[in-house]
Amino acid sequence: MNLREFQAEWMPRFDAYLYSELRAAVPEQENLHKAMAYSLMGGGKRIRPLLVLATLALAGREISDGFAAAAALEYIHTYSLIHDDLPAMDDDDYRRGRLTSHKVFGESTAILAGDALLTAAFEILAETPTLSADKKIRLIALLAKAAGPDGMIAGQMDDVEGEEKRLTIEELKQVHDKKTGALIRFSVTAGCLIAEADGSFAREMEQFSRHLGLAYQIHNDLKDVVLDEAQTGKTTHHDADLNKNTYPSLLGVAGAIQELNTVIGQAEGCLERLAARIDDAENKIDVFREILDYVRI
């Protein structure tokens, strides 16, 4: 099964689950629901949920068992985008080709919608009937760590403080290992935990996700300078306006592309090793190979 086939079979089911959880939590007629749904159901590649579900498929387990973890993850990712776009942060007007949440609903409602998505994420995990109590506890702890002051938030803080100084490339990698990489790593860690995957499988998947997270950020930085707004769906050249440290600003565009290709190659190496270890893995590995196409320039 290739990526397109996997997405066609599983992502509509996941999106239906995602929205059903929102509808159960907040009545549709309320402005809070509308603001949450605007960003949550506003498109995007759903890379993080996709990784959860594809990891379960690769491990040979029931894919729908990952819906709760994937939904919680997408809730948190969406909240982070709403807050990241606010005037106090990146002050973006567009996201995915549409006005950002605070431009549509106002800053106070956007903040509350983000807060609501963050807290509802843990409610989804805590109340899902498809996972054991032990798995719920472990997933909640892992997600809190990935999203909190030791993970994504720490990376966001480092990113903000980095605007006042020039970072080295290694310092920049550390920032994005938390800011972008932590939730991507949780995607495969959650899949491995739910699937009760063995240690060697989990370690190789974690390493793949680490390379993917770095590639994702380098690609994102490059998009800001080599693509236009019609292609990205958001304001371009914004990083330079904010004096952000990026891979192109430190390495140049050619150097950033070279670094991106190196990291993609490392991720591909993880997949090759997994394919050699797992019976009938080739078909399922193709999904991950094609996910890497998202981060190529």
Image (cartoon, rainbow, N blue to C red):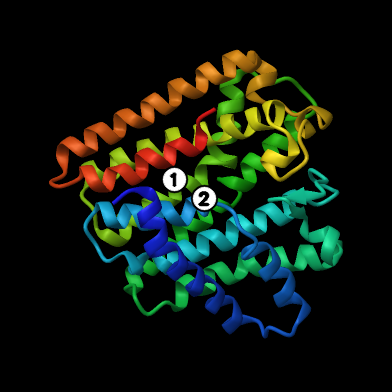
Position of residue 128 in the picture relative to residue 278 (left or right):
right
Q: Amino acid at mark 2?
A: Ala
Image coordinates of residue 251 in percent, x first then y, are 63, 14
Q: Residue at x 58, y 14 (%)?
A: 255
Q: Residue furthest left?
A: 279
The numbered mark at residue 146 is 2
The numbered mark at residue 212 is none
Q: Secondary structure at mark 2?
A: helix
User: Contact (CB < 8 A) between labels 1 and 2?
Assistant: yes
Q: Residue at x 37, y 58 (%)?
A: 53
Q: Secondary structure at mark 1?
A: helix
- Say which residue label 1 marks: 185
User: Of marks 1 and 2, which one's residue comes earlier in the chain?
Assistant: 2
Whether residue 232 is situated above or below residue 61 in the rendered picture: above
Residue 138 is at least partly visible in this image: no
Whether residue 269 is situated above or below residue 138 in the rendered picture: above
Image-quadrant location for residue 32:
bottom right
